[in-house]
């Protein structure tokens, strides 16, 4: 049974664990570190996206409403018999999205990207907002991949600290997988291209 009580932190975390589990390559069983990419997606949703409010652009925490968006979209597909959920969430404290198989979670993202849902039933700020929904479907893919292949997992216990206080504690698996050699200090800064200008002294 899916609980009707949602504790914001554990609910959001479980929902984005389900998201990244569906989108990202499997981590080897012998890899000893927690990648924590779901934490990056949550952090990005709460810190990197701004919306227009009157004349200003303001940062709005979007992890909780986006978790509700995923569950609402999953529920719509289940109600239309397009996908079949498991009786229990595969991630503790999750709701409908967390009850789906990996392939069905991908189907939910596809339905969002292609606007194959009743937009009136979606939570604010996504209700009747097709453009924002398409933007968010793309952002969820991008944030997940960026969190996986960036230095974020390597920050370990410091990953949720303010940026100046994060420290690379180990070599991230995404770097190993992509054969990225890691941080190298001493590269020269790129200062632009050399511009050669001709002179037309005789034509003045």
Image: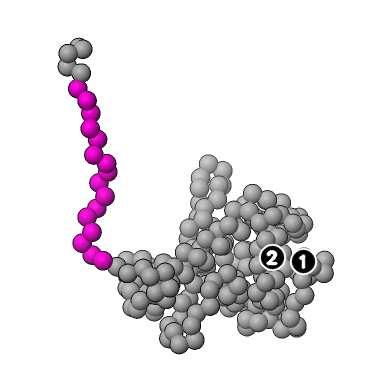
Along the line of sight, which residue is nearer the eye, 130 or 195? 195
Q: Is residue 199 above or below residue 186?
A: above
Along the line of sight, which residue is nearer the eye, 144 or 65? 144
Name which of mark 2 and mark 1 comes first in the sequence: 1
Q: Are marks 2 and 1 in contact (CB under 8 Å)?
A: yes
The residue sitting at the left extreme is: 201
User: Which residue is at 23% across, 39% downward?
Assistant: 194
Residue under label 1? 77
Find residue 82 and report its horizontal and vertical position in percent.
79, 68
Q: Is residue 135 magenta?
A: no
As measured in the structure, the alpha-carbon distance from the residue carrying label 2 to the one carrying label 1 is: 7 Å
Magenta-drawn stretch, dominant element (helix, strand or loop): loop
- Magenta stretch? 184-199
Along the line of sight, which residue is nearer the eye, 176 or 6? 176
* Residue 74 makes an appearance in the image: yes
Indicate the quadrant containing the N terminus: top left, top right, bottom left or bottom right: bottom right
Along the line of sight, which residue is nearer the eye, 185 or 152? 185
Q: Is residue 96 above or below residue 87?
A: above
Disc 1 residue crowd, few under 14, some 14–19, many 20+, Cα 10 Å? many
Helix or strand or loop: what does disc 2 sit on? helix
Left or right of residue 106, residue 78 in this image = right
Helix or strand or loop: what does disc 1 sit on? helix
Left or right of residue 173, residue 140 in this image = right
Find residue 17 and report its horizontal and vertical position in percent.
57, 75
Residue under label 2? 108
Q: Quadrant of residue 87?
A: bottom right
User: Which residue is at 43% across, 73% downward?
Assistant: 177
In the rendered picture of this protein, how many numbered marks are placed on residues? 2
Find residue 187 and report its horizontal and vertical position in percent.
23, 59
Left or right of residue 119, residue 139 in this image = left
User: Which residue is at 22% across, 55% downward?
Assistant: 188
């Amino acid at each position: 049974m899916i609980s009707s009580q949602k504790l914001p932190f554990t609910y959001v975390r479980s929902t984005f664990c389900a998201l990244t589990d569906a989108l990202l390559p499997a981590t080897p069983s012998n890899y000893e570190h927690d990648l924590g990419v779901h934490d990056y997606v949550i952090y990005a949703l709460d810190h990197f996206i701004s919306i227009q409010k009157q004349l200003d652009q303001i940062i709005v925490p979007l992890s909780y409403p986006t978790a509700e968006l995923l569950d609402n979209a999953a529920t719509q597909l289940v109600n239309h018999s397009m996908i079949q959920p498991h009786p229990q969430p595969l991630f503790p404290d999750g709701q409908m999205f967390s009850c789906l198989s990996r392939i069905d979670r991908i189907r939910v993202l596809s339905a969002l990207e292609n606007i194959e849902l009743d937009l009136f039933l979606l939570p604010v700020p996504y209700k009747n907002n097709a453009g924002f929904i398409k933007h968010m479907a793309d952002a969820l893919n991008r944030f997940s991949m960026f969190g996986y292949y960036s230095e974020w997992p390597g920050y370990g216990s410091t990953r949720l600290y303010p940026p100046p206080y994060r420290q690379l504690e180990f070599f991230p698996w995404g770097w190993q997988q992509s054969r990225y050699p890691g941080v190298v200090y001493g590269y020269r800064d790129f200062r632009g291209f050399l511009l050669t200008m001709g002179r037309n002294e005789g034509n003045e």
